[in-house]
Amino acid sequence: MRLPLLQGVLPVDRAGLTRDVLAGLTLAALAIPGTMGYTKIIGTPVITGLYTILIPMALFALFGSSRHLSVGADSATAAVVAAGLAGMAVRGSNEWLALCSLLALMAGVLMFAARVLRLGFLADFLSRTVLVGFLTGVGVQVALLEVSGMLGLQRTSNDPLLEIVRDLRLIGESNAYAVCVSLAVLAVILGCRRISDRVPGGLIAVVAAIGISWALGLDAHLETLGAVPSGLPTLGLPHVEWNWPLLQKLLPIAFACFVVILAQSAATSRAYAAKYNDPFDANVDMVGLGMANLGAGLSGTFIVNGSPTNTAMVDGGGGRSQVAQLTTCVLVLLVLLFLTGPLAHLPTAVLSAIVFLVAVRMIDIKGMRRIYAVARAEFWVALLTAATVVVVGVEQGILLAMVLSLIDHVRRGYRGTNLVIVADKKKRGWQTVPLDEPQAISPGLLVYLFSHSLYYANAGQFAEEILRLARNRTQPPLRWLCVEAAAIGDVDFSAAAMLRDTAALLQQQGIRLLFANVSAPVRSQFDRYGVTEAIGADAICGSIHAVVVACEQAAGVPAEAPEVQAGQAGQAGDDAAKA
């Protein structure tokens, strides 16, 4: 497997280089407090949030194809991991962090396996509807879980409904200092956002909170981060007891994260590639995402994902290549080396407030309303997905999202909307009409347009509609029923058996089954499954025009002659194709 390099960086736009660097500065200012907040969701030391913006982001910039996607910590995958690991280790312990890093390695391996199998198309099977519902559910869950931190109360569970009920019951015991800090952070961030999305409200709130906490000695009145280690992450495998039972327990969590990463990253990359008409390859991006998660696992941090929020920050700052993300990596490196000391005075309520706002922004009320207005049935699917995430869990929610997306795809795809092709009113061309309004395209000839591949699930629909059309009383009586097969890309064993049986039933009624515009692969399947032998090789014709001409010529000759004429129709189609 070839590992392409620097697709997101080259060619370097020298005129836009300064703009990319400034966008990287903006991303660092906004993402540093955000990633520290994500550590509260996943339950790892705050320094691990900064690690996600160092090696993983740089690796995607080197190995990914997207010029825009920003890779780092993400609330959705953080929530999946936190929910999945509950009960497997003590939250916040070294064992917990080691399991988080191991999950990152497993997600990276799944990404590489998907790249080898060219499974980038799987991202298309998570519908926008269920993604809106899933992310909304994650937003609700994370927001409810952060209320205790904003009130200065200790969190006792990862169940958002139980936790919010407990918070309401103990609201009288809230820490007044934590409440004031949380409200101040919310006010600063929302106020800066009203001014401009480029104003780093989160960074301003963090710096101000650190200064005030140090000056007023707030460490004595509310919980702060405490000593934060400086320096670079230690590279190496996670310190866990590697065994197959453990990997079996972690595999469903890793797979759920893999699906979220694949769908969210591909959707974000595709959107920005289309916006700027840039090249984008989902399979190459999987290599970049795999490398990023391997880097995360080996550098002692947690799973990373393509972040729509951070990508929008870079785009809003004017960034048009991965140079912006590499600039951010350099700035985080400087913070890790020289600026971790002041973080010890940061109140944890600040991070809870930042995460709360991030979670609230994930709750896509506008998207849910839009779905409700135009697709009521899909709205209930999205709502069910969101409710599952909140009530049951994030891992179960993403699995449900996958199942519902596939069910929706099958529901829409296996029964096509089929039509009858007829002559237009001026007899100068053709048009389509519904099956309940069939008309002969020429005397004795009806043309049926089937709009899907033929397989076991829709073979019954094909036979039912064909036989219903054959029962229509036309003048003159129906002698040929032609299937326009241009949309039939595949025929399976069950469908082939149905075709043989249907042809025999039509033959008993004196009707010949013909096919027009059969592709070469489908013709090979007809030959292999015995369909050609059952209907006659001369029944597989060229174009519809050739069939019409041949059948019109045959209309004045004895009934046994259509076989010959159908063969002429096939020859006419071949001649037309050559012409």
Image (cartoon, rainbow, N blue to C red):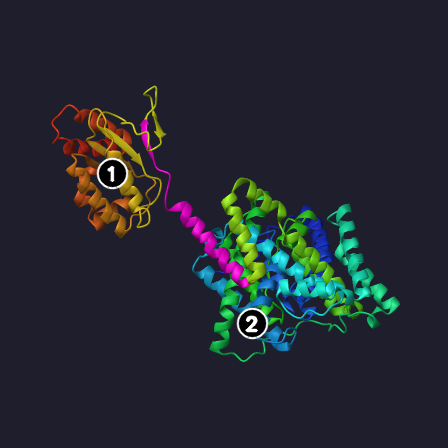
Measured as percent of width and height from the top left, residue 548 is found at 25, 28
User: In the rendered structure, does residue 417 fall within the stretch colored magenta?
Assistant: yes
Name the image quarter holding residue 427: top left
Q: Name the image quarter holding the C terminus.
A: top left
Residue 370 appears left or right of 152: left
Residue 435 appears left or right of 551: right
Q: Is residue 74 above or below residue 128?
A: below
Residue 429 visible in the displayed image: yes
1 vs 2, front mark: 1
The kind of residue tagged 1 is Leu
Please give the label number shown on residue 467: 1
Looking at the image, which is closer to me, 538 or 126?
A: 126
Measured as percent of width and height from the top left, residue 52 is found at 64, 64
> Which region of the structure is painted magenta?
395-422
Measured as percent of width and height from the top left, residue 169 is found at 71, 65
For label 1, the crowd category at 10 Å Cα-Cα, with few meaning under 14, some 14 to 19 and many 20 or more, is: some
Looking at the image, which is closer to me, 269 or 552?
A: 552
The kind of residue tagged 2 is Leu
Q: Are marks 1 and 2 in contact (CB under 8 Å)?
A: no
Q: Is residue 239 above or below residue 286?
A: below
**Residue that sits furthest to the bottom in the current view:** 241
Q: Which residue is mark 2?
A: 102
Query: At numbered mark 2, what does the secondary structure look like: helix, strand or loop?
Result: helix
User: In the rendered structure, does residue 21 fall within the stretch colored magenta?
Assistant: no
Residue 557 appears left or right of 89: left
Overall secondary structure of the magenta section: helix
For label 2, the crowd category at 10 Å Cα-Cα, with few meaning under 14, some 14 to 19 and many 20 or more, is: many
Q: Residue at 32%, 46% (x, y): give it.
A: 458
